[in-house]
Amino acid sequence: MPTGVEVETAVGDSVDVVNTPTYIPHRSGSLFGVISMQQSSQVRGAVIVLPSLAKEVIHTTRALKLLSETLAAHGFLALRIDYANTGESAGDQRDPLAAEHWVDSIRTAVSYVRSLGIRNVTVVGHRVGSLLATQDVDLLGQLDAIVLWDPVVRGRHFVRMQKALYSIVTAESDGLPDSVPLVETDQSDNLVHLMGLTLHSAAAKSLSGMRIDSAALDALPKTAVLALLRDSELESDLAQSIRVNEGEVSSVGDQTDFLEAVNPWVVTLPDEVETIASWIGRRVGDNTPESVEVRSTSSAVVAHTSDGQPIETIVRVLPGNRIVWDTALVGRHTAARHVVVTHTIAHDIRTGPDRLFYDLAIDVAGLEGRVVRFDRAGVGESGHVSDEDTHIRLYKRPYIDEGLRILDAIELPDNATIVHTGVCIGGWMASHAAIESRRRFSTNGSQSGAVIVNPLRWRLRPPVSTGIVERRHRVGFDVPTGEGGESGLAKPTTAPPILRVFKAIDRNVVRRLVGLLPEDAYTVISRSLLARNPDSLVNSIYRAGASVRIVFGPEDYQLFCRYGGPQGFEKRGWRVPIYVGESGDHVGYSATIHKATMQACRDALGLKEPEKAPPSNAPSH
């Protein structure tokens, strides 16, 4: 059984599977990984599971964890990693050498499992993971087998598609009044924005230049390749080459729901998990299991401040197998008086859109603060995987209670400030957490606040039914959507007639009554079933003694105005700090929403933005 860190145990049909978060040393900084194996520590081989990149990682993390747990139940040690410069691993995603570091991360993972004394090593690459795994022929020659799961054959196609998705969802501020102050978009010729990943142009060029060369797979033994391909690729040169070498090629089927979940409360656990685990099990055969000793590391230095101070992330496993990432200057975690807690959208993992919450952690820690990130139960790395994980009921009391559990793991020094932040429903959850933090921590002089980003629901009380609320996530915005297939986006959805009636009543109630009613009567109206007056939520936060700041993308700010937000705030005499991005999207993948959210969190904590170092294109090591 692994030692050195708390572990979570998943009970299978006949064995106990242990999931152990750990950090692995790497030349560009520590890699975060999770090891899955049987509690007996007896293994008959190792499997390294490689994720994709960008937005695809958020939707597929749970499925890759299921694959790891399934492999562990079959007697393997499964290791999943975040590549350097991604996820919870060290390194800025904008590093010019990021693509090189990704490939080197795979070498590090293979070396790590070899160091445990495991001789049989297989790699499973999902999407871009397949592409990266085939870039080093020498590394392929060290493997016993490889699984290409819906592989990205050409990096250029992936980069183009993710750039297009980013452009489609990012709205501009053309329709906003000139009087609205805007958070400006940073202009840089050196950055390339993908959906969920920001790259230096050099790294984007490197990724674009990658392709899966079928000849490289010749370095593997015959029968050592399983390729799960889309129907359009079943007769490709890659597929034919694999068949010539007696590998196996199968159809992967429609992957749209798996890769591009339309709804944030639903994820897919694909059938390919059992297909892959069974194939690897048959290929390895009846190897005699050997005992391995894994010494895991629960903390790592993931960055440094401009003056060289180390920033450390500590990983903890809370009751119920909930995983927490806690980032601060080394030795300052419990002493930090400026704390941010992040809350994600439904099934989104702790790093947030475009690694927002990781970057926020490095930023705040560098100013002597602390940032706590976590995966909710049944999301990302928290808890063993089950069919119940596929659906989360949003905006309900159990959803709130689950989000508030993180407060049980936080102790604040006297006179501290704790700020909760999140996008969309994450902001709604952050509002509840700010109110509860005020109740729990005010006795020691601490203050609490919320930074809410693009909220959809303006009433704190959970709804009786989430049906209409969930439909608002699909139809509440005029975000351009394409056809399915190449774009990967869902087809446009038309609001049901009854919902259009409710929305019309909403707007008319707000517009007609904001300026006419006395404040007490207006408060009653704003809490009604139909009205979605923004000041209702803000009033609940203020009444609890907490503070609030709001971040909007252009379209969300327009919706805020349609619901009478500015008029309601003015009527109450409030000066709520509002940050409107010059461009942006609802779920926070935009670089401008990223910038505005970090600025709002620093302001809420009373911290100044650090001075930027002179730009440099020098490679990092």
Image (cartoon, rainbow, N blue to C red):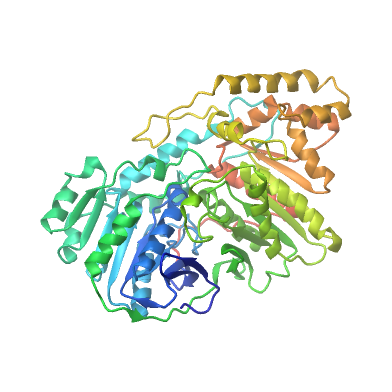
Q: Residue at x 46, y 66 (%)?
A: 33
In x, y percent, where is residue 545? 83, 48
| In the depicted structure, whether residue 563 falls above or below residue 610 | above
In x, y percent, where is residue 227? 24, 53
Q: Residue at x 85, y 33 (%)?
A: 573
Q: Residue at x 23, y 57 (%)?
A: 226
Which of the two residues, 469 or 24, is positioned nearer the viewer here? 469
Quarter of the image containing the C terminus? Answer: bottom left
Q: Residue 529, can we see it? A: yes
| In the depicted structure, whether residue 58 falls above or below residue 585 | below
Q: Is residue 195 left or right of residue 509?
A: left
Residue extending farthest to the front is: 14
Quadrant of residue 179 within the rendered picture: top right
Q: Is residue 64 left or right of residue 581?
A: left
| In the depicted structure, whether residue 617 falls above or below residue 33 | above
In x, y percent, where is residue 90? 50, 64
Which of the two residues, 447 or 45, is positioned nearer the viewer here? 45
Q: Residue 596, can we see it? A: no
| In the depicted structure, whether residue 612 falls above or below residue 137 | above
Q: Residue at x 73, y 26 (%)?
A: 564
Which of the two residues, 604 or 204, is positioned nearer the viewer here? 604
In x, y percent, where is residue 505? 69, 19
Residue extending farthest to the left is: 244
Quadrant of residue 565 within the rendered picture: top right
